[in-house]
Amino acid sequence: MRIVVAKPGLDGHDRGAKVVARALRDAGHEVIYTGLRRTPAQIVATVRDEDARFLGLSSLSGAHGHLFPTICQLLRDEGLDDVVVFGGGIIPDADRPALHEAGMRAIFGPGTSTETISAFVAEASGRDDAGVGASGGWVWEA
């Protein structure tokens, strides 16, 4: 699978994103890490240009409630409904339902193992209804 891992917004902490990118690469996936401080439009352009099937977002700044749904909407606007979006970082449980409704398929918090994230990618890659625009979508709970 081709996977883009991105850090939207002004959050300058990327160790977790790099660990996830490396683990997914070690699991045999092609991973494109965008680097820090990317705009939603830049991230969506990378997903489109790289023809990625998955997008992993990382946020530790508290801006996930705005940035993650914006990116999901931009993906739909670009016709990239088949991209599976997952996220991680400091995301309170109370914020998760709105993120799932926006199109996020999984949210991984601090302490989630890389094996769990790899298992999510493996499961999601085998599903026909896994995309952002999937009707009656599903979510992964870790």
Image (cartoon, grey):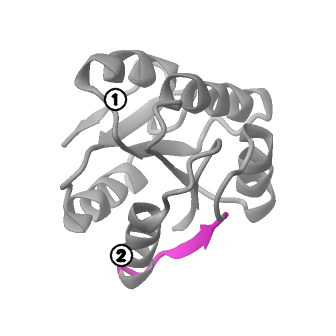
Whichever of callouts 2 and 1 sits on the residue coming sooner in the sequence is 2
Q: Which residue is mark 2?
A: 23
| Residues at marks 2 and 1, CA–CA distance in whole angstroms | 24 Å
Q: Tell which of 141 and 113 is nearer to you.
A: 113
Which residue is found at the position 67% from the left and 25% from the top?
A: 73
Look at the image and say whether residue 108 sits in the magenta stretch: no
Please rate how many residues cluster around mark 2, counting C-alpha atoms within 10 Å: few if below 14, some from 14 to 19, many from 20.
some
The dot on residue 116 is: none
Which residue is found at the position 24% from the left and 50% from the top?
A: 110
Look at the image and say whether residue 32 sits in the magenta stretch: yes
Instruction: Answer with left or right where residue 137 lies relative to residue 134.
Output: left
Instruction: Answer with left or right where residue 114 lies relative to residue 38.
Output: left
Residue type pointed to by label 2: Ala
* Residue 55 to residue 67: above or below: below
Q: Which residue is mark 1?
A: 138
Secondary structure of residue under mark 2? helix
Q: Position of residue 67 (x, y in %)?
A: 60, 31
Secondary structure of residue under mark 1? loop
* Residue 54 to residue 35: above or below: above
Residue type pointed to by label 1: Trp
Q: Which residues are magenta?
A: 27-34
Which residue is found at the position 53% from the left and 30% from the top?
A: 63
Instruction: Answer with left or right where residue 23 lies relative to residue 38.
Output: left
Which residue is found at the position 45% from the left and 79% from the top?
A: 25
Q: Position of residue 104 (x, y in %)?
A: 45, 32
Q: Position of residue 33 (x, y in %)?
A: 61, 68
Q: Position of residue 13 (x, y in %)?
A: 49, 58
